[in-house]
Amino acid sequence: MAVSAPRKAVLAVVAAPLALIAVLAAAWGIDAFLHRDTVLRNVQVAGVAVGGDTEAEATSSVRRLATRFAATPVRIDTGEFTLDSTAADLGMTVDVRRTTDAALDARRDDPLPTRPVRWARSLVTPTEVPVRLSVDSAKLTSALGDLEGQRRTLPVEPSLTGTVDGVTVVPGSNGTELTTNDVVRALPFELDDVGPPIAAKVKRSTVPPSVSDAEAQALADRANGVTDGSIKVTSGSQTFDLAGKDLRPAFTVALDGPAGDQTARLSMDPAKVAEVLSRKSPAAAANPTGVRFTIQGGTPVPVPGKDAQVCCAPQAADVLVGALLEGKKEVTLPTRTVTAAEGVEWAKGLGVNQVVGEFTTQHPAGQPRVTNIHLISDAMRGVLIPPGQTMSVNDTVGRRTKEKGYVVAPVIENGKMSEDVGGGVSQFATTLFNAAFFAGLDIPAYMAHTKYISRYPFGRGATLAYPSVDLKIRNNTPYGVVVWPSYTNTSVTVQLWSTPYVSGRQTGQNKSSGCGQVVTERTRTWTDGRTATDTFRANYDCEPE
């Protein structure tokens, strides 16, 4: 059937665009096929043409952009001041992988019907792909701290401070700073051009402490609770009570978790706990290895004792902290070994170098009691009294027995003359008492004879009876004190060796008769010029000796 001329004209008009579209689609298809492994035609990354580049070529182009970008000036305006730096110094970089991928994907993800049209447009107008940026948060944080300098005020966490009276809170305070998150949000994530300066406006933030004062107060309350009372400590053969209040200065607030999401817990400073243990344990200032002294050519020389297990091993502080925070009132701590050689080295530093107190008493020769005086003198020779420690004669010598060589000799018992093994040792006690009296040492335990014996100083005597009546000498000096007895057939002498620190002299006595209560006054004089008086009492029966 013949087609009319008008109808032919209409068909031509309709067919022409379709033909054009078909041609355009065919051309796009051919071009897309030719660029299937390269960047599409006329694509630019931040103004740099990469159309037709292979992936490797496009990557190389983006890397050159990244190198240029490193020197880009960056200004951060806080409203209070400005900070000038560069992209590289702030940790800003071009993300080469993501930028290259964006160039390779340019126009490939357009809706299918529009792709030929976009392709045609690209023949005259390039497709722009911005560079993608990334930020190294750690580097930015460090750079911001350096740039802000003293203008940055860091938040102060609340802390704990402790004395024996209690643990209290030191309140925290807010900080003011440019936070990393705020700056990251203000910086661009992509750029259409590389080179022009980057400007960011960022208000500084008020940064609160991670821990509130109320949370810290709860920790302080717990610290006071767990240190109420004492803790029974066992370490090796030693058992002692440690006052909880002495540990209060060691409490701290510990923060757990990442910055910005931290939680607080009660902790303790192991070094401070160890320091308390070193002061309060029985071995702290004692003589655990049993060092004694001898006198060689007029010079005191330490004599080694034996290795000893004492409190405490280095890890003991951690063990004590764990027990305390668990609310335990008893704990067993690991010991440490003090060697005999260490004991000698310690003793060498105690300043034992000269006689600081000396006294001699007389006795008839040949009596049984002389044997006992010599035995107890031998047992006490070279005994060391460490600084701050108290020496007990009964504890040092023990019971006087026949097995040890002591013999029966006269004693005064309940005010009556009698006989017993070890009789006569009170003469040694009296001699030691007087040496300590003139050396200015403390004498916390003593008992005078109930009868005045004329060979002893009036009002200044001391007797012994195991275990009830003891003589104790306390070393109230910062130096070691060594007891050094010697004897002849008719006398016993006790010297006390140390470094001069204090001396004593009798400055008063209430009576001179031979019975009744006698009060003797001693005046002590320290090397720095200080003086003080103390008194000693004796109560003598008025019956004849």
Image (cartoon, rainbow, N blue to C red):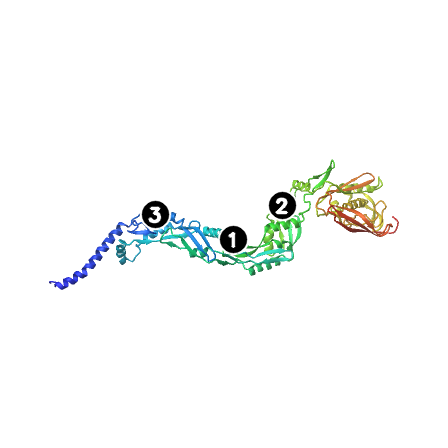
Determine crowd level at label 3: few under 14, some 14-19, many 20+ residues with C-alpha closer than 10 A.
Answer: some
In the image, which disc is placed on residue 61? 3
Mark 1 touches mark 2? (CB < 8 Å): no
* Image side of residue 101 versus residue 348, left or right: left
Q: Vertical placement of 457 versus 10: above or below? A: above
Secondary structure type for disc 3: helix
* Image side of residue 126 versus residue 339, left or right: left
Secondary structure type for disc 1: helix
Towards the viewer: 48 or 158: 48
Secondary structure type for disc 2: strand
- Marks 2/3: CA–CA distance: 68 Å
> What residue appears at the point 70 percent right and 39 percent down from the top-left corner?
302
Q: Nearer the viewer, mark 1 or mark 2?
A: 1
Determine crowd level at label 2: few under 14, some 14-19, many 20+ residues with C-alpha closer than 10 A.
Answer: some
From this viewpoint, is residue 328 visible? no
Mark 1 touches mark 3? (CB < 8 Å): no
Instruction: Specify the amino acid type for callout 1.
Output: Gln
Q: Residue furthest top?
A: 297
In the image, which disc is placed on residue 150? 1
Spot occupied by residue 189 in the image (x, y as percentages of width and height) = 39, 55
Spot occupied by residue 12 in the image (x, y as percentages of width and height) = 16, 60
Instruction: Specify the amino acid type for callout 2.
Output: Arg
Q: Vertical placement of 184 versus 499: above or below? A: below
